[in-house]
Image (cartoon, grey):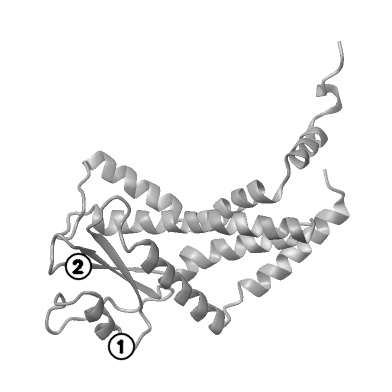
């Protein structure tokens, strides 16, 4: 078990870093949201195994949202079309399209801050606060950010599938039985809707990338009662 002084320093640095990262700086919010939407356009240019599935990520705050949506879905917008209204903290409009069903598309809203920024910031704060060499922190950040963005892609996939591509919509890519629809909805509720996942999953990732096996073994030995330790025969 680390000494109390080390634990106190970790908690203090972690709280300070979280205070900085979770402060809603306007520039940081806009910058991350732009990166989030660009990454979404790249990752979901094709919806996994269904090449006909295509998603565009647009800024709900944009004054030219209708024009941008018209460009993203050429020849699809009906006259007098209105996009989904802006409801904070949602800042991103996802336009879902099925290339085999031209003329149809769907709209879903999401929050880049809740879905992507919170788990990323939480993981970064944990890694930076942990006492270890900066070289190890660098590798932990690289591995951790790869894993947390895989988690973000999973969350988006669940939302896009449950709310659109697997729903009974004209642009649906596949259909599910009632049982699997229920399963998909429950998984989305746990990993996407419940904000707890934004902190629990990054904490697990931190434990995987920031700790050596020897540290886990030392912690296990410190937690074992002295009478439970192995003794030679």
Residue 12 screen position, x and y as percent: 78, 64
Examine the image and state in which quarter residue 136 appears. bottom right
Left/right of residue 182 with respect to residue 225 in the rendered view: left
At x 36%, y 55%, the residue is 157
Q: Disc 2 designates what residue? A: 105
Examine the image and state in which quarter residue 128 appears. bottom right
Q: How many marks?
A: 2
Left/right of residue 226 with respect to residue 191 in the rendered view: right
At x 48%, y 66%, the residue is 114
Q: Is residue 135 above or below residue 183?
A: below
Q: Is residue 102 above or below residue 131?
A: below
Tell which of 193 and 208 is nearer to you.
208
Q: Disc 1 designates what residue? A: 64
Residue 156 screen position, x and y as percent: 39, 59
Circles 1 and 2 in contact, beta carbons < 8 Å: no
Secondary structure beneath disc 2? Answer: strand
Left/right of residue 128 with respect to residue 3 in the rendered view: left
Tell which of 76 and 109 is nearer to you.
76
Left/right of residue 175 with respect to residue 116 in the rendered view: left
For label 2, the crowd category at 10 Å Cα-Cα, with few meaning under 14, some 14 to 19 and many 20 or more, is: many
């Amino acid at each position: 078990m680390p000494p109390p002084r080390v634990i106190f320093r970790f908690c203090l640095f972690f709280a300070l870093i979280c205070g900085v990262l979770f402060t809603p700086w306007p520039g940081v919010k806009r910058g991350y949201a732009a990166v989030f939407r660009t990454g979404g356009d790249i990752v979901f240019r094709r919806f996994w195994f269904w090449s006909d599935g295509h998603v565009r990520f647009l800024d709900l705050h944009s004054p030219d949202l209708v024009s941008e949506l018209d460009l993203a879905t050429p020849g699809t917008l009906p006259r007098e079309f209105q996009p989904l209204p802006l409801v904070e903290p949602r800042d991103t409009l996802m336009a879902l399209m099925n290339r085999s069903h031209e003329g149809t598309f769907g709209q879903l809203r999401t929050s880049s801050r809740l879905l992507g920024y919170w788990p990323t910031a939480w993981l970064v704060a944990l890694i930076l606060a942990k006492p270890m060499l900066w070289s190890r922190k660098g590798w932990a950040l690289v591995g951790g950010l790869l894993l947390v963005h895989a988690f973000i892609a999973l969350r988006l996939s669940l939302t896009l599938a449950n709310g659109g591509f697997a729903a009974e919509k004209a642009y649906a890519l596949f259909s599910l039985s009632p049982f699997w629809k229920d399963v998909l909805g429950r998984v989305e509720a746990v990993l996407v809707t419940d904000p707890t996942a934004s902190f629990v999953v990054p904490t697990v990732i931190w434990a995987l990338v920031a700790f050596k096996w020897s540290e886990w073994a030392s912690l296990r030995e410190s937690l074992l009662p002295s009478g439970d330790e192995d003794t030679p025969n």
